[in-house]
Amino acid sequence: YNPNQLFGKQLRGAGYVRASNLFIQGNLLMDFDKRTYDYEKVREEVLTVLEFLKTKPQYEVQYLQFSGTSGIHLYGTDKEPFTNPDPFKRMEEYKTRRASLMQDLKQWLTERKIELVTLDNNNVTTNPYQVFKPTKTIDMKSGRQVTHIPIHTLKSKTMKEILSTIPT
């Protein structure tokens, strides 16, 4: 199953029909949650991770979305196919790759003396079953719309400005 199909983005290798071809091409999902921090902190940290991902050509960021409640979801693609013929081993490879990516991110941040506090990396990026809310749905907690945020908008506007344009 490929959550990008929900958003009208058919990826090569997607459209799984039977278990034998699961996780031929995986998604990259990251959840930045404001928790007790403000939305501007979330925006800054997403921009930091986007800089890190530029050093990883294997991953392509497709889009960002406001979660409807308290953060930003990052969607991307892992362009390196999973090759093991066993679908369960491919799932384990997915988890291993995501854990390795998170380890690389931690090292990259440490070298730059940066600390991320909003990235929920323990159960999203390494979870092959994680699915985020479809864009334009209404979040039941906040009543706000789950909304696509172009990267250029995230770079050029504050979260206050971005949130003021999101329907409630």
Image (spheres, rainbow, N blue to C red):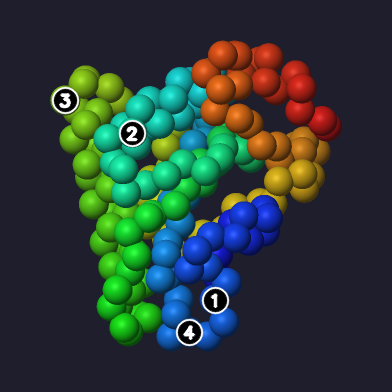
Disc 1 is placed on an element classified as loop
| Mark 1 → mark 2, Cα distance in angstroms | 29 Å
Query: What residue would you read off at disc 2?
Result: 54
Query: What residue would you read off at disc 3?
Result: 111
Mark 3: amino acid: Glu
Q: Earlier in the sequence, mark 4 or mark 3?
A: 4
Q: In the image, 78: left or right of 161?
A: left
> Residue at left 21%, top 31%?
108
Badge 4: residue crowd in 10 Å (few <14, some 14–19, many ≥20)? few
> Residue at left 18%, top 35%?
107
> Residue at left 44%, top 52%?
77
Instruction: Check if mark 4's residue and mark 1's residue have beta carbons within 8 Å.
Output: no
- Mark identifier at residue 164: none
Instruction: Check if mark 4's residue and mark 3's residue have beta carbons within 8 Å.
Output: no
Badge 2: residue crowd in 10 Å (few <14, some 14–19, many ≥20)? few
Disc 2 is placed on an element classified as loop
Query: What residue would you read off at disc 4?
Result: 19
Q: Earlier in the sequence, mark 1 or mark 2?
A: 1
Residue 18: x and y, percent?
52, 85
Answer above or below: position of 128 versus 54: below
Q: Earlier in the sequence, mark 2 or mark 3?
A: 2
Instruction: Check if mark 1's residue and mark 2's residue have beta carbons within 8 Å.
Output: no
- Mark identifier at residue 16: 1
Mark 2: amino acid: Lys
Instruction: Check if mark 3's residue and mark 1's residue have beta carbons within 8 Å.
Output: no
Residue 10: x and y, percent?
60, 60
In this view of the protein, which residue sits in the foreground, 26 or 108? Answer: 26
Answer above or below: position of 22 versus 52: below
| Mark 2 → mark 3, Cα distance in angstroms | 16 Å
Residue 28: x and y, percent?
43, 51
